Image (tube, rainbow, N blue to C red):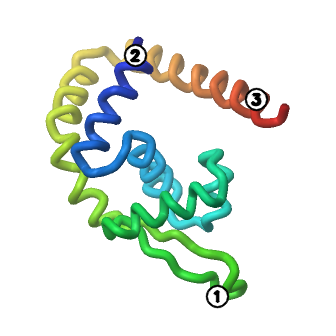
């Protein structure tokens, strides 16, 4: 239920920002990882190169990313996130959620936070293993 609720919230936030929920989350990859090639974004997201081109087009139209050609190989397109514009768009939409989440986290003891952290780290390992196995078949 947590995963479903998370998807619903991110979809609502993405829509409010003029994006789909999945586009919003793919933008998160660029914020977290920084600039990357279109091919790297394709590998990271599992999207086809054609779908990544459409994704980048949508982001570029909103001035959330900039394309540039790699200096060593002009066939490679580097995608640079415009972090300032991204934060300006999303910070107000996450403000209340972030504040309530911080209050919730502050209500836990250090021991409880360590247990929650352990759970999420191990759960992410399991999810990554599962996704890797499914992609390799």
Taking 70 as reference, is 117 left or right? left
The location of residue 135, given as percent across then percent down, is 76, 36
Q: Residue at x 38, y 13 (%)?
A: 112
Q: Are marks 1 and 3 in contact (CB under 8 Å)?
A: no
Q: Residue at x 71, y 84 (%)?
A: 73
- Mark 3, secondary structure of its residue: helix
Front residue of 94/13: it is 13
Taking 137 as reference, is 68 left or right? left
Tag shown at residue 44:
none
Callout in the foreground (1, 3): 3
* Mark 2 vs mark 1, CA separation in Å: 44 Å
Taking 44 as reference, is 8 left or right? left
The residue tagged 3 is: 134
| Nearest to N terminus: mark 3 or mark 2 | 2
Bin the neighbour count of mark 3 within 10 Å (Cα to Cα): few under 14, some 14-19, many 20 and up: few
* Mark 3 vs mark 2, CA separation in Å: 23 Å
Tag shown at residue 71:
1
The location of residue 137, given as percent across then percent down, is 84, 31
- Mark 2, secondary structure of its residue: helix
The residue tagged 2 is: 2
Front residue of 81/56: it is 56
The location of residue 102, given as percent across then percent down, is 23, 30
* Mark 1 vs mark 3, CA separation in Å: 35 Å
Q: Quadrant of the N terminus?
A: top left
Bin the neighbour count of mark 1 within 10 Å (Cα to Cα): few under 14, some 14-19, many 20 and up: few
Q: Residue at x 58, y 55 (%)?
A: 51
Q: Are marks 2 and 1 in contact (CB under 8 Å)?
A: no
- Mark 1, secondary structure of its residue: loop
């Amino acid at each position: 239920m947590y995963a479903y609720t998370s998807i619903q919230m991110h979809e609502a936030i993405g829509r409010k920002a003029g994006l789909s929920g999945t586009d919003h989350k793919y933008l998160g990859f660029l914020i977290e990882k920084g600039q990357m090639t279109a091919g790297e974004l394709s590998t990271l997201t599992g999207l086809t190169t054609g779908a990544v081109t459409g994704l980048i087009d949508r982001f570029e139209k909103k001035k959330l990313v900039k394309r540039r050609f790699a200096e060593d190989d002009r066939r490679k397109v580097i995608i640079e996130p415009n972090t300032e514009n991204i934060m300006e768009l999303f910070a107000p939409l996450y403000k209340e959620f972030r504040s309530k989440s911080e209050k919730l986290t502050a209500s836990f003891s250090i021991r409880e936070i360590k247990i929650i952290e352990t759970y999420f780290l191990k759960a992410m390992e399991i999810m990554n293993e599962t996704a890797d196995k499914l992609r390799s078949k």
